[in-house]
Amino acid sequence: MQANLQTRPIAGPPRARPRWSPRTRRNLVAGLLFTAPWIVGFFALTLYPMLASLYYSFTEYHVKKPPVWIGLQNYAALGSDKLFWTALYNTSYMVAIAVPLGLLVSFFCAVLLNLKVRGQSIYRVIYFLPSIVPVVASTLLWLWILNPQSGLLNTLLAKVGIEGPNWFRNPAWSKPALIIMGTWGLGSTIMIYLSGLQDVPVSLLEAAELDGANWWQRLVHVTVPMVSPITLFNLIMGVIGMFQYFAQAYVFGTGINTTVGVTLGAPLNSTLFYSVYLYHVGFIYFKMGYASAMAWILFLIIMACTLLLLRSSERWTYYAG
Amino acid sequence: MRGRAMAEITLRRPTSRPRLSRRVRQGFQAAASHALLVAVGLFFFVPFLWMLSTSLKSEQDVFRMPPTWLPHDNLRVDVGGKALPVYDVTLSDGSVRRMALVSMAEGRGTFVDPAAPAPPIEARLRDAQAVLVVSLRWQNFVDAMERSTRPGVNVNFFTYARNSLIVAFFCIVGTLVSCAPAAYGFARIRWPGRDALFMLVLATMMLPFQVTMIPLYVIFTTWLHWGNTFLPLIVPTFFGNGFDIFLLRQFFRTIPEELCDAARVDGASEARIFFNIVLPLSVPVLTTISVLTFLWAWNDFLGPLLYLTNPQAFTMALGLQDFQGRHEVAWNLLMAASVVFTLPIIVAFFFAQRTFIQGVKLTGLKE
């Protein structure tokens, strides 16, 4: 400390004035040392792999032999790959339907959990709990609940006179099945919304009430705009997550297909999502170059969607203060 | 708007509704709220009950139509040292007798009366109605854990559970020793380039795993020959991750700067400040990180799927999926295994409920 005071540059000839004071330099060394593991990890486990996969995407690569440069052929081949388009369609379906639906349900649940009633903490636990059940366990559980013959859901539907669909054999119902399953695990989105709702100033709601706004009007005109930044956050996270939708689809697809043998995406490729197909191409066929091209397209799509959402959000999000 | 509301208020005031009606209305509102909360809550809760119920059922009971909530099993009676299932048999004369089933063939069964086993009676199985009693088959849990999951390979769910625990433990260690110092470096030391680097940390959180997945696989399996070991799952955690660094940094910034500055004036090094002042104050957030990391490691599916192909090395998530894909699905055992798989998480949740919610909320605050 004392040394530091002595070496502080004194007003005088500005020759060879150190750009950083010794203290700054010491801090720089300390800062770099403290963050060193992350910096090393960034280069070795993020930056290098990113560049490598970009390079692989222009090659034919089967792991055993070194990659061979083939230019844009992987990307060209993707254009005429029917399964690629199927996977992209299936994923877009989930992004366009499951994500907004999930937000709507989460918001609705959060509103319920924010009502001033007794025992609310118990309800909150119950709504949250499914979201921490390990994905493989929850998917297996839902495979059993959705079992067309002896599953709980179709049994309950039959009780009220509805013949439940064959969730596993009918490609039109497999994605809705996954959406129902996903809804069960929305707990963390609900909790994020709930914390947002709790931050809505009571004074605003009271002012609206004095102005004669009823419950619904207060919800739509005060609460919804006030939590719009959280909606944006949940939306972006939901979209990014959904483009990478994997474990549920993988377990679901193989789970309903035990008798037919391992083909991912059953029934009839209706659950062949982007990441599932990418896994299939990369780690079952070991077409690493092709899979890398898919990965980079996925990356670009995700970036484009995120930017688009951020841009559009200027029009529909409201930041207090 | 305002004018109309005022008008309403002034209009209402003279009529002066009795107090009671307001209380009744509030009571009605509370009842409606509870009704809604319960109705939606059932959707979240019933699947748990179904999982638990199935895990305690016998094999026939699983597929019994219509399904029952309480697990049932055949009532059994001891005849000549054997526990035989009991049936209500409608005899040819229309009378119903409660008898034990000794054997069956071609749709016909041989029954005996436990009280008088002497002459066996033959009857069509169609005319026999199984007598059921509520019985919880705890044996399922033992079977699910001990049964060999792959023919010829000596593995069961204990193997998987052990593997999962090993992976989760080292992931927690790795995350703590790498993220806490990094977060301190970003939160409490002022150095040139820090903020730019921190933006990079945040940016990595947006990067989809698929982009780095293939080269990482090549590095870990063909260069380092770490296939079928836990190293590809554990080692990366020792290099920190954006999410936990962010979470810890947010917490460290709430520790009063004056504390650190006072120590600096006294000549303490950054390392000493970190170990002696910041870490002891950060036990709650370090617990949060540990719990969340456990959750993540216990849950992870894609990582183990990429690197582990030998059943001996399977984690619980992988083992469960493999078990299900390979067998005629024994739903009761599968659900029992799922319960065992889920239980540590639920237990952790009830011990660290606040921690969980806090973790979720902190993630929500990162804008």
Image (cartoon, coloured by chain):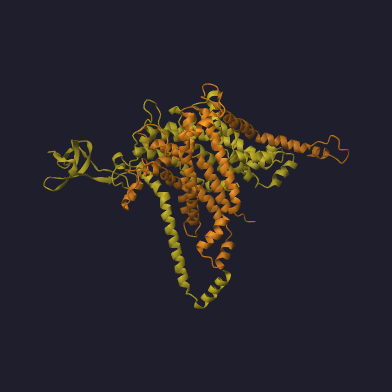
Chain colours: A orange, B yellow
Could you say which is closer to the camera, residue A114 or residue A304?
Answer: A304
List x then y, in percent, for residue B127: 17, 44
Instruction: Residue at 28%, 40% (x, y): give it.
Output: B60
Could you say which is closer to the camera, residue A153 or residue B362?
Answer: A153
| Residue that lies at the very extreme toward the top in this rendered image | A65
- Look at the picture and state if B194 lies above or below B37: above
| Residue that lies at the very extreme toward the right in this rendered image | A13
Instruction: Residue at 51%, 37% (x, y): give it.
Output: B297
List x then y, in percent, for residue B242: 60, 39
Q: In which quarter of the image is the N terminus of chain B?
A: bottom right
Q: Can residue A273 be seen in this view?
A: no
| Residue that lies at the very extreme toward the bottom in this rendered image | B14
| Residue that lies at the very extreme toward the left in this rendered image | B93
- Look at the picture and state if A310 lies above or below B323: below
List x then y, in percent, for residue A47: 61, 32
Could you say which is closer to the camera, residue A54 or residue A204?
Answer: A54
Relative to B227, is B245 on the left or the right?
Answer: right
Q: Quadrant of residue A318?
A: bottom right
- Look at the picture and state if A99 lies above or below A52: below
Instruction: Residue at 36%, 27% (x, y): give it.
Output: B151
List x then y, in percent, for residue B238: 58, 33
Q: Can residue B330 be seen in this view?
A: yes
Instruction: Residue at 78%, 36% (x, y): give it.
Output: A22
**Disc count in the image?**
0
